[in-house]
Amino acid sequence: MGITALKTALPRELLASVVVFLVALPLCMGIAIASGMPPAKGLITGIVGGLIVGWIAGSPLQVSGPAAGLAVLVFEVVREHGMAMLGPILVLAGLLQLLAGRFKLGCWFRVTAPAVVYGMLAGIGVLIVLSQAHVMFDSGPKPSGLDNLIAFPSTLIQAFGPGTGMQAGMLGLGTMLIMWGWEKLRPQSLRFVPGALLGVGIATGISLFMALQVKRVEVPDNLADAIDWLRPADLMNLADPAILVAAIVVAFIASAETLLSASAVDRMHSGQRSDFDKELSAQGVGNMLCGVLGALPMTGVIVRSSANVQAGATTRFSTIFHGLWLLAFVLLLSSVLQSIPVASLAGVLVYTGLKLVDLKAFRGLGRYGRMPMFTYAATAVAIIFTDLLTGVLVGFGLTLVKLAFKASRLKINVVELAGEKEFELRLVGAATFLKVPALTQALGTIPQGSTVHVPLGNLSYIDHSCLELLEEWGRSNAAHGTRLLIEPRGLKRRLEGRIYTTTGIGSGAA
């Protein structure tokens, strides 16, 4: 971009960056709280996402920062391994992302079945709602989604007793109501004002005016105090298989969410398209740096990115400036952040979690049959009642089962030809070991002493188990005058193995 074009675009980029900053500020802190981390950790990740990743990103209009989609995973990691282990995990996850981008593997992260991704986000959304519902009443979240669900009535009963639970709950619910109302009734002239900021701002003002003794955000006066530098000794823990698995899961989910967001951003504008491999490498650099600083993991985030595009951004400068505004606000106005009720941020997260349960996407999957809808539901339920990794594996498993079923479809027909005791075994589809029983049954209907033609041209694939079955059947029935003629014309490389001509078995022209 030339100097003249930059001068023309700069005012628009500055306005867009302010809008993104206003959206990102409450979300960075809220997601950190949902992750079981101090709010300042989320702000550090947002700053890195803007100032560092913004410069090198392959998707110039995408905004990176802490994401609700990783909050549940980070909470599990911190609970099981401690906050100190998050740094090494992010360094390794970032390195994997960087290498994946360098080796042009970005496209492979986009082949994940949409049903699994939507189901994963829905499950994460429900877990966020279940955990932050406790935080919204000034209580603490439980270790698992099921525990949060079971314990919520007790939290609600305690809120009606002495203490600040009900006051906090009203602030959280009020924040959600303002966000919902602003989304529905927002004037066109004020569309740049995010509902989350408005809700948190009003809730904070009410809590200060009424001098409510609710829990408030804890942010250090000096941002440097929130940095937990990675210790070289902590890297030795990467030899632990559990730590390795956690790093791989973080890398995969962060990459998939980033590239799905980048694809969505590309559909929102007609400008420069995303370079997915470059974006993946940039995310890797960002996550490695977050690991060194002891911050949260980052992804490309669709909420902030869509706000960026809708505010008129056309270059990466809006993303960079939003990181600058986050840094300036934390350095100069940390006392403002310290006055925000935790319950209000929890309300923002509950609202965000509900939005992640995308029922429109669920209904849209119905166009492709019942199996994608079942995969969506099964993935979400497994995440809610077990953990994120198990749920994702369930989704992938169901997808593979569907592929195996589709790939193993085989139509088998025995047709009597004009000649005496002459038959044709017609096979259409893929002949795999799964169809050996059906193929055996079909061969059993052919009278002994017959001539059987088996054309393979209509098969997309035939494996060795089916070939061996045909050849063995021909050999075992040859003594009764049966002739089996396998005709592989047209099959070419779809054939696994080589057809041998043995006693009683004829081979048609190739």
Image (spheres, helix red, strand yellow):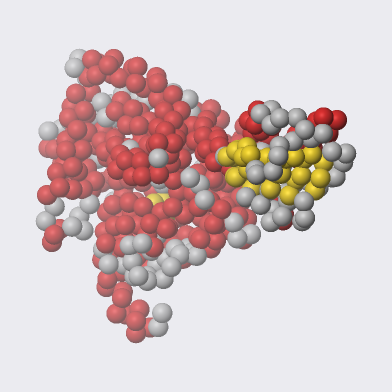
Q: Which quadrant, please, contains the N terminus?
A: bottom left
The residue under the point 12% across, 33% down is 210
Query: At which x and y percent is residue 474?
Result: 79, 35
Q: Residue furthest right?
A: 503
The residue under the point 24% across, 19% down is 156
Q: Which quadrant, please, contains the C terminus?
A: bottom right
Residue 447, quarter of the rendered image: top right
Q: Nearer the viewer, residue 411 or 398?
A: 411
- Res 411 seen here: yes
The residue under the point 68% across, 48% down is 456
Residue 127, quarter of the rendered image: top left
- Res 239 seen here: no
Query: At which x and y percent is residue 435?
Result: 64, 34
The residue under the point 24% across, 46% down is 196
Query: At which x and y percent is residue 134?
Result: 31, 25
Residue 337, quarter of the rendered image: top left
As drawn, 195 above or below 134: below
As drawn, 170 above or below 236: above
Q: Nearer the viewer, residue 248 or 506?
A: 506
